[in-house]
Amino acid sequence: MLEKFISVRIEVLKGSTMKEKITIRDIAERAGTSKTTVSFFLNGKTDKMSEETQARIAQVIKETNYRPSIAARSLNAKETRLIGVIIGDITNTFANQIVKGIDDFARDNRYQLIVGNSNYNFENEKGYVNRMLAMGVDGFIIQPSSHFAELIPKIKQENKDVVFIDSQVSMDKEKWVKTNNYESILNVGTHLIDDGYDEFIMITADPHVLSTRLERTTGFLHALEVKGKTCKTHVVADDVTSDALRDLLYNELRFGVRTLIFVANCFLLPRVYLALKDYRNLMPDTIGLIGFDNTEWTNFSSPTVTTIVQPAYDEGYQAASILIDSLKGTNEQIPNQILKCSVNWNESTKQHK
């Protein structure tokens, strides 16, 4: 009985045929060209390739349903045309626009993105860097936390280029694109202080996590210092609730005292706005409110909210441009760029057009 079973199993195995794995060599043979030419086609290097050859290769790939292995290409090729992107918090609109800007430029230049969300956590950043290096990314675009500088030697050891966005690390020779956060809030804050507010409240997440947060909080405090004013600063947790913020503001706001509230983080602004539900009718004469970004709702709320707006899409687009320029070896792009913010004056403050 056992012999019969083994015999049946052998016959079944003999009768079955495994689907052959298509290789670049197979594609080249069927298209009547070389492996090198097929490799160039797969990597987007078709500038010197005839349209006829491209069409033949494309047709064979379509007929065979060939799918190149990213892992194999990363081991065998000098480039994978993959860019590793690490963002602090992918959930907010600012980050969405940055990634879109990166993707638009990368796609136009036949690069693809691998995106990771670090939650501003160094261990998460470290894990993403290691995994992306293992996948063979050609370079990185990173919104770094304050500790990211520790990972730069590892990236350099692998001969990978990196461009930082939004925040800088404490290394002068790195490439980066950021916005003029400090100057923006310094100038806007000065205008609003002159409007006659008597007290000032700043609400911020931990400013030491990102250089961007430090620039904003420092800019606002310097604007007050120049005018001889002081500020009540509240450093809150990233996950603070609107109810907790409502209690905080209830204890801080004094009846009839003109108070300006500055919210340093875009993700905190909607929570503060919700916390001020019972005070919105006092804007802007008794209570003023200003924050960053959030234009998807601040232009339609009642009252509308004044914000400093970062050119997030342009920031991502320029970061990709700098990185790919470096990968190509053309080095035509300025490696360090500061983009200017704009001010979207609205009803939560007096307007300064």
Image (spheres, grey):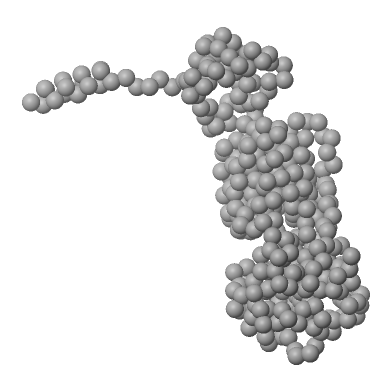
**In which quadrant of the rendered view does residue 136 lie?**
top right
- The quadrant of the image that shows the C terminus is bottom right
Is 293 in front, or is 26? Answer: 293
The image shows residue 291, relative to residue 247, as above or below, that is above
Q: Quadrant of residue 349?
A: bottom right
Residue located 20% across and 19% down the image: 11
Place of residue 194 in the rendered image (x, y in percent of width and height, measured from the top left) = 91, 77
Residue 278 in view of the camera:
yes
In terms of depth relative to the viewer, which is nearer, 27 or 149? 27
Can residue 214 be seen in this snapshot? no
Count of marks overlaid on the render = 0
View extreme (top): residue: 32
Residue 302, percent from left and from top:
71, 72
> Residue at 58% across / 26% down in the picture?
76
Of residues 266 and 181, which is closer to you in this image?
A: 266
Residue name at image x 68 percent, y 78 percent: 276
Q: With respect to residue 95, does 229 lie above or below?
A: below
Q: Is residue 112 left or right of residue 196?
A: left
Which quadrant would the N terminus be assigned to in this image? top left
Q: Position of residue 281 (x, y in %)?
A: 73, 81
User: Looking at the picture, how far across and down is residue 110, in whole percent?
Assistant: 67, 32
The residue depicted at 77 percent of the width and 78 percent of the height is: 283
* 323 sits to left or right of 90: right
Q: Is 71 on the left or on the right of 9, as rendered? A: right
